[in-house]
C-alpha cells in the first residue's frame, strides 16, 4: 500500500509541476505598473541639476526603474541595508528610507512624462532598439564639464521616489552606466521649501572606470 501511495505522489508532482511553472512564467510576464506622475518632477530636477549641459541634444533613459543600487549587489534594497551603510552620515529620516525601500522592491515602467526640455529616448536592458546612441569615453565625474561635453547622455536609470510621512523630503537613486564601461550611481536627497523642491544633498554610491572594477561605498 505504501508503494502505491508513493507512486501516486510522484505522479502528482510530475503532472502538476508544468502547471506551476506556467503560472510562475505568467506572473513574471505581467506588465509592470506605470510610474506615478508625481515622480517625474524629481526626475526632471535630477537631470537638469546634475546631467544636462548646453550641448545636450538627447538623453537615453532606461525604460524600467532600477531595483538595486550597486552593480555588484543585485538584491533589492532593504532597511537594514541602508542602516548598515549609513548614507548621508545616517541623517536620512527612517520613514523616508522605509518608503523608498518599499517602492523599489520591483520595477515600474516609465512613460513619456519627462519635462527637462531635451529630446529623450527609452531603451530596455542591454540596449533594446536604440543601440545607435553612444557617447565618447570621458572621465567619470559628478558633473559633466561644459567644454567638450557629449551631446548625448547614454544612459540614465531611475528608481522610484521615496517620500517621508510629511511629504517634505524625497529620496531618489540615479545611475549613469555608460557603454564604454564608465559610470556612477547617486542617491539624491531633496527637501521641499517655500519655493518648491530643491536638491539638499548627494551621496555617490559607486563609480566605475574602464581600467578598474566598479568601486565606491559598500
Image (tube, helix red, strand yellow):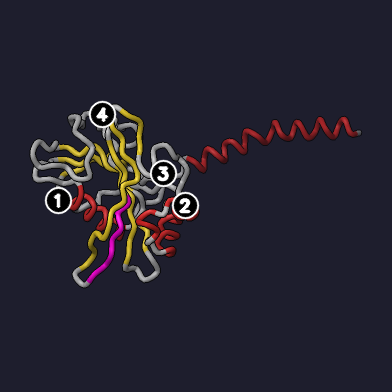
Camera-side residue: 140 or 154?
140
Q: Is residue 160 magenta?
A: no
Is label 2 or label 4 in front?
2
- Label ID, residue 218: 3
Does residue 189 show up magenta in the picture? Answer: yes
Q: Quadrant of the image for the N terminus?
A: top right
Q: Name the mark on residue 117.
A: 1
Q: Residues within 10 Å of mark 3 (few under 14, many from 20)?
A: few
Please provide the residue range marked out in magenta: 187-193
Tell me if mark 2 has few (under 14), some (14-19) or many (20+) residues whose alpha carbon lies within 10 angstroms of its own: few
Q: In this rendered view, identify the residue nearer to me: 117 or 172.
A: 172
Q: Residues within 10 Å of mark 4 (few under 14, many from 20)?
A: some
Q: Secondary structure at mark 3?
A: loop
Q: How far is the residue under mark 1 from the one under mark 2? A: 38 Å
Position in image of residue 18 (x %, y %)? 62, 33
Q: Taking 103 as reference, is 15 left or right? A: right
The secondary element bearing badge 2 is classed as: helix
Question: Disc 2, disc 4: CB below 8 Å?
Answer: no
Q: In 3D space, how far apart are the residues under numbered discs 2 and 4 (Cα atoms)?
A: 31 Å
Amino acid at each position: 500500500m505504501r508503494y502505491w501511495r508513493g507512486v501516486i505522489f510522484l505522479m502528482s508532482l510530475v503532472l502538476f509541476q508544468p502547471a506551476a511553472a506556467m503560472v510562475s512564467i505568467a506572473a513574471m510576464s505581467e506588465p509592470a505598473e506605470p510610474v506615478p506622475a508625481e515622480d517625474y518632477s524629481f526626475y526632471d530636477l535630477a537631470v537638469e541639476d546634475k546631467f544636462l549641459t548646453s550641448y545636450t541634444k538627447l538623453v537615453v533613459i532606461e525604460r524600467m526603474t532600477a531595483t538595486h543600487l550597486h552593480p555588484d549587489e543585485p538584491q533589492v534594497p532593504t532597511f537594514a541595508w541602508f542602516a548598515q551603510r549609513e548614507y548621508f552620515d545616517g541623517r536620512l529620516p527612517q520613514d523616508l528610507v522605509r518608503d523608498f525601500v518599499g517602492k523599489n522592491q520591483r520595477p515600474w515602467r516609465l512613460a513619456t512624462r519627462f519635462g527637462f526640455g531635451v529630446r529623450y529616448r527609452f531603451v530596455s536592458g542591454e540596449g533594446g532598439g536604440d543601440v545607435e546612441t553612444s557617447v565618447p569615453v570621458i572621465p567619470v565625474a559628478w558633473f559633466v564639464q561644459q567644454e567638450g561635453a557629449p551631446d548625448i547622455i547614454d544612459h540614465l536609470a531611475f528608481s522610484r521616489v521615496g517620500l517621508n510621512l510629511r511629504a517634505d523630503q524625497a529620496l531618489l537613486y540615479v545611475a549613469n552606466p555608460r557603454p564604454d564601461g564608465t559610470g556612477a550611481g547617486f542617491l539624491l536627497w531633496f527637501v521641499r521649501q517655500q519655493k518648491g523642491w530643491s536638491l539638499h544633498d548627494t551621496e555617490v554610491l559607486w563609480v566605475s572606470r574602464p581600467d578598474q572594477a566598479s568601486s565606491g561605498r559598500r
